[in-house]
Image (cartoon, rainbow, N blue to C red):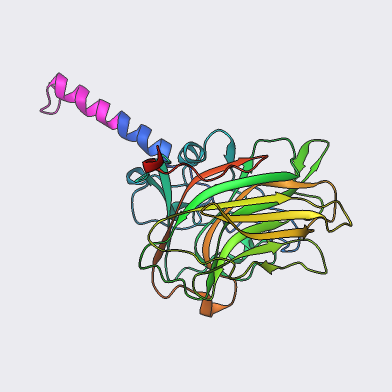
Amino acid sequence: MRGGMTRRELMRSSAAGALGLAATGLSGVLAACGPGMGQVDPASETLPPDTAAPGAVSTTPGSARHTLASATVARQFFGEKLVPTTRSSFGLDLAEVLPSDDKRFPSFLRVSIPSDVTNPEEARIYQDGATYGGIQMFVDHTLRSPYELYMRYYVRFPQDFEFGKGGRLPGFFGTIVKNRIRTETLRSGFATRFAWRDGDFGLIYANTARSDHPVNTVGKASWRWPRGRWVCVEQGVKLNFEGFADGLMLIWIDGQLVYKDQQFNPRISNDLRTGGFLVTATFGDGGATFKPASPQTIDLAGFAYDVKRLNPLPKPEDG
């Protein structure tokens, strides 16, 4: 005996302590933008290096929640074909991975959006204005520099979601690829993020590096975002050749083609390729009046991509 404990009790206490340390180690991997990051040129895709500083402070112990602030959790959620990164990220501890309530995907991401959080100015990209709450994360694909790519994911707004004046959702981002090596230090990229504006009206923010149209809002009111259910979101992008308006952007909502642009031309360099998902769920980009009036949540799930259209996943009742 030692200190009033039997040998068996002592062994149990030691084992419990070791397990607790292991759990703490797994959940303590944080990745988000911090105060030491350099200023991002909003007209370029020059991005600051990764950091290990948390983007926001959570009041819930990390071991009790599975969030994207854990590199392990992020990798498990996005899967083998997507690579989550920490460049220009924020709000990762506000994005919690939960068991799915839909058989089409094993888990989903619940993004919490407080009503009083302004995102860091140094994490602004693609000429974004101020954004409020939520998450921003670059997630790379693992293909070799495609210039045509298709995505699919699912989004769910709660039944009582207050859209307010506007916000942004995930979409594609572009990156420069030279000699099959990805770089963020050369000419500018692009972003094609889904969004909402003036209530539940859908649109795309198609930011480019072109001086004649750096910020484009396209497809507004081509669809409206439903509340209270999962919505299948698809986007296809084929990049133009430099100097020509011969690119293509296609948008499907719940399997229906709602927007088509056959003159999409974000490219100012033929080295520009589609880099992956820019996972965003925030309010804002139109001044302080775009802040959420009250705390909100947005659910995301089923991120996937291919060189051809994926189509919606079969509904459980469809077999």
Residue 189 in view, yes or no: no
Between 44 and 108, the residue placed more toward the observer is 108
When asked about the image quadrant of residue 144, the answer is: top right
- Magenta stretch contains residue 68: no
Residue 308, above or below 215 = above
- Give the image location of residue 221, x and y in percent: 58, 70
Q: Which residues are magenta?
A: 1-17
Residue sitting at the far bottom: 289
Residue at (54% x, 53% y) in the render: 233
Between 309 and 93, the residue placed more toward the observer is 309
Residue at (21% x, 28% y) in the render: 13
Q: In the displayed structure, does residue 302 sit left or right of residue 247?
A: left
- Give the image location of residue 128, x and y in percent: 65, 67
What secondary structure do most residues of the magenta stretch adopt? helix
- Give the image location of residue 88, x and y in percent: 62, 54
When asked about the image quadrant of residue 156, the answer is: bottom left
- Give the image location of residue 123, x and y in percent: 62, 60
Residue sitting at the far right: 243
Q: In the displayed structure, does residue 180 sit left or right of residue 311?
A: right
Q: In the displayed structure, does residue 215 sit left or right of residue 227?
A: right
Residue at (41% x, 36% y) in the render: 25
Residue 219, above or below 36 = below
Work out which quarter of the rendered image holds the N terminus and state it. Answer: top left
Residue at (69% x, 62% y) in the render: 206
Residue 162 in view, yes or no: yes
Residue sitting at the far front: 318
Work out which quarter of the rendered image holds the C terminus and state it. Answer: top left
